[in-house]
């Protein structure tokens, strides 16, 4: 578990549901919960909140043991829209509260993220959100929030994997007391055949994917790998019985090429 700046905690390894079709979501989340995941990440834009909630509510697991994240989509930024959109997400999830609610993208061209953040502060105050955070925010966006609001984001969820290690953003988060959460922690499979990761993994009897996830753990990142394959869901969780050496961590550090898979946060409008 990782402590957040508001006194709450989040599991370091969670289960992501990005690009999982609604018809596959329930079974994938249910299996993840059976395996032992206790943090589930979704978003309004994923179109699968209802299925995520169904799997959670049908799991029999005490709600207090689970950590549920969802996100506000770009078209719903602004005070009134953000409040309505949150209520719609909560209804689809079938939950009384969410543990973490994020602004999905800053969309600086619309210049509504500070107003949106202020609305989220109010929603948190009424108890239906435990923690509020952001996703895909750059340093300049975090600075704007600091100038225009009272609450420091608990989390910034950003694209982060060995080919895009985001050192500057991780340092900026550490300076502000923000936890770094990595989306696309496995680079969407693009590094599964990487020779360095393969060699390191084989030395531990692990895959390249498990090696990357272990790297995230040792950096202190929160991560949310996704899969619909039951065996991969299980293997992604099986990363607690080995440790990477300093030399192995340095070898993975050398893979940083600044390569984004997703869009540029300064330009993306959705």
Image: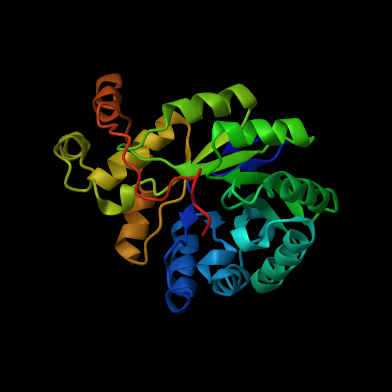
- Specify whether residue 5 is in view: no
In the image, residue 222 sits, relative to residue 252, either above or below, namely below
Q: Residue furthest front?
A: 109
| Side of 119 relative to 89 (left or right) | right
Residue 223 placement (x, y as % from top left): 46, 45
Relative to 173, 125 lies left or right: right
Of all residues shown, which one is farthest toward the bottom? Answer: 23
Closest to the observer, 33 or 162: 162
Q: Quadrant of residue 142?
A: top right
- Colour scheme shown: rainbow
**In the image, residue 249 lies at what x, y percent?**
30, 26
Number of numbered tags placed on the structure image: 0
Asked whether residue 54 is in view, the answer is: yes
Residue at 73 percent across and 59 percent down: it is 82
x and y percentages locating residue 66 in the rendered image = 62, 55
Quadrant into which the N terminus falls = top right
186 or 205: which is nearer to us? Answer: 186
The residue under the point 42% across, 32% down is 166
Residue drawn at x 49%, y 47% is 267
Q: Is residue 238 left or right of residue 153?
A: left
Q: Is residue 102 above or below residue 202?
A: below
Q: Position of residue 179 (x, y in %)?
A: 57, 35
Question: Which residue shows up at 83% across the image and 50% down it?
Answer: 122
| Along the viewing direction, whichever of 27 and 177 lies nearer the viewer | 177
């Amino acid at each position: 578990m990782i402590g957040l700046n508001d006194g709450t905690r989040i599991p370091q390894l969670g289960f992501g549901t990005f690009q999982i079709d609604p018809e596959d979501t329930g079974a994938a989340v249910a299996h993840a919960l059976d395996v032992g995941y206790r943090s589930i990440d979704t978003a309004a834009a994923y179109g699968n909140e209802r299925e995520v909630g169904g799997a959670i509510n049908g799991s029999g697991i005490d709600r207090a043991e689970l950590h549920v994240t969802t996100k506000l989509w770009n078209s719903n930024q602004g005070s009134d829209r953000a409040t309505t959109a949150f209520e719609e997400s909560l209804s689809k999830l079938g939950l009384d509260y969410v543990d973490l609610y994020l602004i999905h993208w800053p969309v600086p061209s619309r210049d509504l993220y500070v107003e949106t953040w202020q609305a989220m502060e109010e929603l948190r105050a009424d108890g239906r959100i435990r923690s509020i955070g952001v996703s895909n925010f750059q340093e300049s966006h975090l600075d704007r929030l600091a100038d225009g609001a009272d609450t420091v984001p608990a989390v910034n969820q950003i694209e982060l994997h060995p080919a895009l290690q985001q050192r500057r953003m991780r340092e900026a988060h550490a300076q502000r007391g923000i936890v770094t959460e990595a989306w696309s922690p496995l680079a969407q499979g693009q590094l599964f055949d990487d020779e360095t990761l393969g060699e390191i993994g084989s030395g531990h009897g692990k895959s390249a994917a498990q090696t990357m996830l272990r790297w995230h753990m040792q950096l202190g990142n929160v991560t949310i790998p996704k899969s619909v394959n039951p065996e991969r869901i299980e293997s992604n969780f099986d990363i607690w019985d080995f440790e990477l050496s300093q030399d192995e961590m340095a070898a993975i550090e050398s893979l940083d090429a600044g390569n984004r898979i997703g869009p540029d946060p300064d330009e993306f409008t959705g």
